[in-house]
Image: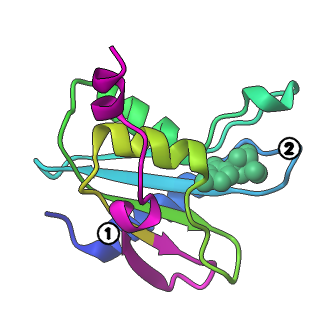
């Protein structure tokens, strides 16, 4: 397990790599695996706006594509005074791979707010419903 401060630093550093020329809204994320590895991501915007991808999914997909399957925490850092929770699309994807994930939101001052994905995404859609519909 990494020190929370270390993970927060990684997410803030990833935020510095954000490609956000259209929104000007920078987001950085750091996903921690059960084995203690850390994968970072930033938001990447495309000129056809809807093709943009959020920092959280970049970090998670990087980890998944390296073979990682067990996740403990995600840190999400933004430049805002308020804490920025993950968008609905990211909540779904995070839930599909890590329903027990701890979510740590970090504001511009580096203050942290802890929560759990299950509380951010109650009554989630998921593979259990897909199975029932077959
Ligand atoms: N964004 C994220 O990276 N994560 C979120 O959870 C919310 C939104 C990005 C997408 C887009 O590049 C910008 O923030 C504004 O929506």
Write down the region rendered in magenta. Answer: 105-134
Which residue is at a point 61% across and 53% down the rendered structure image?
87
- Residue 7, compared with residue 56, is above or below; it is below
**The C terminus: image quadrant:** top left
Which residue is at a point 67% across and 47% down the rendered structure image?
18
Rendered image quadrant of residue 66: top left
Circle 1 is placed at which residue position?
6
**Is 113 placed left or right of 82 in the picture?**
left
- Asked if residue 70 can be seen in this view, the reply is yes
Q: Nearer the viewer, residue 88 or 81?
A: 88
Q: How crowded is mark 2: few (under 14 residues within 10 Å), some or many (20 or more)?
A: few
x, y (%) of residue 60? 40, 39
x, y (%) of residue 19? 73, 41
Circle 2 is placed at which residue position?
21
x, y (%) of residue 116? 34, 68
- Asked if residue 41 can be seen in this view, the reply is no
Q: How crowded is mark 1: few (under 14 residues within 10 Å), some or many (20 or more)?
A: few
User: Label for residue 128?
Assistant: none
Per the image, is 110 magenta? yes
Rendered image quadrant of residue 103: bottom left
| Residue sitting at the far front | 133
Any atom of ligand 1 within 8 Å of the CB at mark 1?
no
First in sequence: mark 2 or mark 1? 1
- Residue 39, compared with residue 130, is above or below; it is below
Per the image, is 40 magenta? no
């Amino acid at each position: 397990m990494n020190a929370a401060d270390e993970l927060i630093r990684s997410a803030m550093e990833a935020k510095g790599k954000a490609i956000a020329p259209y929104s000007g809204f920078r987001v950085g994320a750091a996903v921690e695996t059960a084995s203690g590895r850390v994968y970072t991501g930033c938001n990447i915007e495309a000129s056809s706006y809807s093709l943009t991808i959020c920092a959280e999914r970049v970090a998670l997909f990087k980890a998944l594509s390296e073979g990682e399957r067990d996740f403990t925490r995600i840190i999400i850092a933004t430049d805002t005074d308020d804490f920025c929770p993950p968008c609905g699309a990211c909540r779904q994807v995070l839930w599909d791979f890590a329903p027990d994930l701890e979510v740590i939101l970090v504001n511009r001052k580096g203050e942290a707010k802890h929560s759990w994905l299950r509380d951010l995404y109650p009554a989630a859609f998921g593979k259990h419903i897909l199975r029932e519909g077959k």
